[in-house]
Image: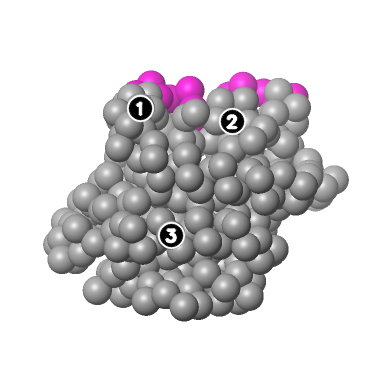
Amino acid sequence: MFKKTALALAMLGATAVANADVLTTIKPLGFIASAITEGVTESKVLLPVTASPHDYSLKPSDVEQLKSAQLVVWVGEDLETFLEKSIDKLPKEKVLSLDDVPAIKAIVDATEKHDDHDDDEKHEHDHDHKHEHEHDHKHEAHNGHDHHDHEGHNHDKDWHIWFSPEASLAAAEQIAERLSVQLPQQKAKIAENLATFKTNLTAKNEQIRNQLAAVKGKGYYTFHDAYGYFERAYGLNSLGSFTINPSVAPGAKTLSAIKKNVAAHKAQCLFAEPQFTPKVIESLSKGTQVKVGQLDPLGAKIELSQTAYPQFLQAIADEFSQCLK
């Protein structure tokens, strides 16, 4: 009897280790993690895709998930502000803060310098729409992705690093490194998964570059300043972004400022996001020749899998090429 119990306990222990999972805060990080955890352990995502990483409130069940995860992967306090206190309570070896990874920091810092240079060219347009926007929208409660533009610790840095294939590869390498330490018996499989991820990403990069080469010169606006890394990686021509509340139709002043900019810069397309109401889209495209596309920064429709991250990049690329063609 004792032998059986000991065996059962040993098996239970093995199962507990085998089921230890990698928990990422947002779905795109889950795409990267699931490429590395394939056949090793499970990847899970903390936030529902309908929630914004900038202003989410943790539920008791979320706190339990954080405690029980083998590894928690987040961008850092400048993006997922709500998590800071909970992360501080976890053992250091269980947390991967991507904003501390030197390779990722270097990419983010380089972008900041790049943006300073760009600011001179875009100043005129930004001044126009920011002034109009502030005037119209100060009283509106911001919900959705651009919360950090107003309250983040470090809003001059772009932490939407999952749009950078380069930063995402660095994230994958870090996840692989951490898991290899935690699950040494799976080291070979983890290394194989990382190699597969690199191969898939290299091929996808090449494919997207070729696909988007045809629309490189076409100007467009987005409604959320999140796509800079993607735009730079594939040479797209963003004219800027209009920060408007997804659920409230823009006021007359904002509307006329946006339409004026669209006309002046001969923009081909305005890109909204899934949480924008049809009314907002309609009021913006009415009376103009401009097309309206939709970019999903969190990849809501994509399932976690070994190839999810290349699929995510492809979905964004398809939206750009369809609207800008």
Mark 1, mark 2: which one is toward the viewer?
A: 1
Return the disc, 2 or 3, that comes first in the chain's sequence: 2
Determine crowd level at label 2: few under 14, some 14-19, many 20+ residues with C-alpha closer than 10 A: many
Toward the viewer: 323 or 28? 323
Q: Residue at x 62, y 25 (%)?
A: 153
**Is label 2 in a helix, a strand or a loop?**
loop
Q: Is residue 91 magenta?
A: yes
Q: Is residue 218 above or below residue 131?
A: below
| Badge 2 amino acid | Asp
Name the residue: 51% across, 48% down: 129
Q: Which residue is mark 3?
A: 260
In terms of image quadrants, where is residue 117? top left
Residue at (39%, 36%) from the top-left corner?
123
- The residue labelled by disc 1 is 116
Residue hosting label 2: 78
Looking at the image, residue 116 sits to the left or right of residue 196; the answer is right
Q: Is residue 28 above or below residue 256?
A: above
- The answer to whether residue 60 is seen in the rendering is yes
Residue 277 appears left or right of 319: right
Compute the Cα span from label 2 to label 3.
Answer: 33 Å
| Residue 224, x across and y down, in percent | 51, 51
Residue 62 left/right relative to 244: right
> For this rendering, which residue is in front, 150 or 254?
254
Q: Is residue 106 left or right of residue 99?
A: left
The range drawn in magenta is 89-106
Residue under the image location 65 percent in, 56 percent down? 245
Q: How many marks?
A: 3
Residue 19 in picture, x, y percent from top left = 61, 50
Q: Please tell me whether the stretch drawn in magenta is mainly helix, strand or loop.
A: helix
* Kind of residue at badge 3: Lys
Please identify the quadrant where the C terminus is shown. bottom left
